[in-house]
Image (tube, rainbow, N blue to C red):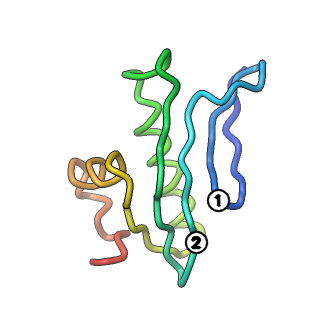
Amino acid sequence: MKEWINEENRIYLKDENNNILASVDFVAHDSIYDITHTNVDPSFRNQGLAGKLMLKMIDKAKKDNFKINPICSYAVSFFDRFDKYNYLLAND
């Protein structure tokens, strides 16, 4: 069974063997989450996991009333493609 885990500066998906399948790292400051790194295990790429990580980050930002500063290349491209979430961007 796969399970999403929320830690202080990381959200990740692990499998039943505790292998990390996908993760997003972020730094919190001044009511902003800087998304610094996303990673998906090569054997699970092209299955939408990176996008799901971003949606988890969006949910967290909304819940915590934070803005998002996408720093890593995947986060930047996600917010470029899905501009309906741009109201959460720190520079908006």
Q: Name the residue under label 1.
A: 9
Q: Up-down: is 75 above or below 60?
A: above
**Circles 1 and 2: CB distance less than 8 Å?**
yes
Q: Give residue 30's position: percent from left, percent from top.
A: 53, 84
Q: Is residue 27 left or right of residue 42?
A: right
Left or right of 3, for residue 64: left
State how many labels appear: 2
Give percent across and percent down for residue 37.
47, 50
CA separation, marks 1 and 2?
Answer: 7 Å
Element marked by disc 1: loop
- Quarter of the rendering containing residue 79: bottom left
SS at mark 2 in the image: strand
Q: How crowded is mark 2: few (under 14 residues within 10 Å), some or many (20 or more)?
A: some
Query: How many residues crowd mark 1 within 10 Å: few (<14), some (14–19), many (20+)?
Result: few
| Residue bearing the label numbered 2 | 28
Dot 1 amino acid type: Asn
Residue 7 is situated, as x and y percent measured from the top left of the image, at 72, 54
Front residue of 7 and 36: 36
